[in-house]
Image: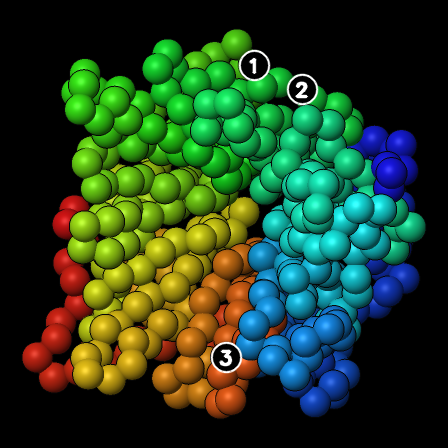
Amino acid sequence: MGNTGRAVGAGVAGALLVSLALATPVRADSGGTAAAPDTAASCAPALRVLKSLAGPGDGNPWLHTDQVNGIGPLGLSVGVSHDKPAYWLGTAVHAVPLPAGATGGSVEAVNRLGLMVGTLTGPGGRKAFGYRPGAKAVTLLPGGQYATAVNDRGHVVGHRHEPSTGTSAGLEWSGGAVRRELPVPTGFRLDEVTGINNAGQITGHGSGPTGNDEDPYDMNPGLLWSADTAAAPTLLQPLGGNYEYYRPQAIDESGRVVGHHWYSRAMQETPLLWTAPYAEPSYVPLPAGSTSGTFEDISPRTRVSVGAATTYNPPEDTVVRAQYWTGGGPMRVLPGLTPTGYSAAYAVGDDDRVGGVALDAAGVAHPVVWTCAGRQAYEPVAPAGREARPAKAP
């Protein structure tokens, strides 16, 4: 069934480091020119277009999902290519082997030892998995459908849907086995589990009761679990309400949580930062001229957050660009494959590599990595009569 029987955890560290070192990933531009390996202190600013897996329907490649979801060590990045779980060494793409019954999926995250986690899809449903670069098979994670994050100790988090209740159950795995099912407050339902750091803090979000009989789930806060398996989660402030949702997406090693506020009535998002003691978050200013934006990831130790900023330019097309924030100062955007082409950032590493997706002039989506991203990021000029939104709650 595709299960190698090996533990998903810190015990694979040596094999992972050896396999990655032997691969000797190098920098390469979209034309395949090789250069020296990246380091945090020395890198060449570039927007790398990564190779994609071949597959049926290549005549309509914009119909596929192709993006980078995680940044690993030694030039490793992970994500999805042509709707299948994939990883890249430099720009070269490698398919994650699919077990019997699986037809697609995605790698969602990778730790600094190269351990990948994600979700398989197929007629038999979704299954959470772990994988090591070059291994012959994935390791299926028991009881889970989605594996969304992994820390450097090999602890994996994710969730499964409960059809009988329409809710989700959050899970933490260690050593390939379930360590715990994440508790939620009485009356709450869990939506997603989104992140974990090395201290064992876990992020997610859900919905809870406020006493309103007309809508029993009109409180929509972020959730934060500690490493204590018996402890209830912290409800991140604000708690949300009708049309308002708070969505933590990632947590760094110092406990900084990033995500966004979603105001569904106005179809508007605002990037957020929570810090201990996790009271009111900081509403981070958007790039000049933008009207909506998200944070999707934060680097483990360097406080860089990335996501996407949206600018509505009626009657012209909407512009969506990858955005980049150092933890202070103005929000900036990253260059795309065309001046106004769609791009979004989903992952960032301590070496200042940023992963995501960008559309070319033909509208085809490509998985991409920005190297030395901070040296490429810039402050856009707002259209006449349009100013940046302030850093406060909508």
Can you name the residue that lies furthest to the left here? 385
Dot 3 falls on a residue whose secondary structure is strand
Asked whether the residues under the numbered discs 1 and 2 touch, taking CB atoms below 8 Å apart as contact, a structural biologist would say: yes
In the image, what residue occupies the spot 24% across and 56% down? 267
Q: Which amino acid, by three-letter code, is at mark 2?
A: Arg
Q: Is residue 41 above or below residue 15?
A: below
Looking at the rendering, which quadrant does residue 281 occupy? top left
Image depth: mark 2 or mark 3 in front:
3
**How far across and down, in percent of the image, does residue 254 sit?**
47, 37
**How far across and down, in percent of the image, does residue 305 sit?**
43, 55
Mark 2 and mark 3 lie on one chain; the one further toward the N terminus is 2
**How far across and down, in percent of the image, does residue 346 sit?**
50, 59
Pointer 3 residue: 359
Please name whichever residue, 303 or 10, is drawn nearer the observer in this view of the structure: 10
Q: Which amino acid, by three-letter code, is at mark 1?
A: Thr
Mark 1 and mark 2 lie on one chain; the one further toward the N terminus is 2
How far is disc 1 from disc 3 in space, using C-alphas? 43 Å
Pointer 1 residue: 229
In the image, what residue occupies the spot 40% across and 41% down? 248
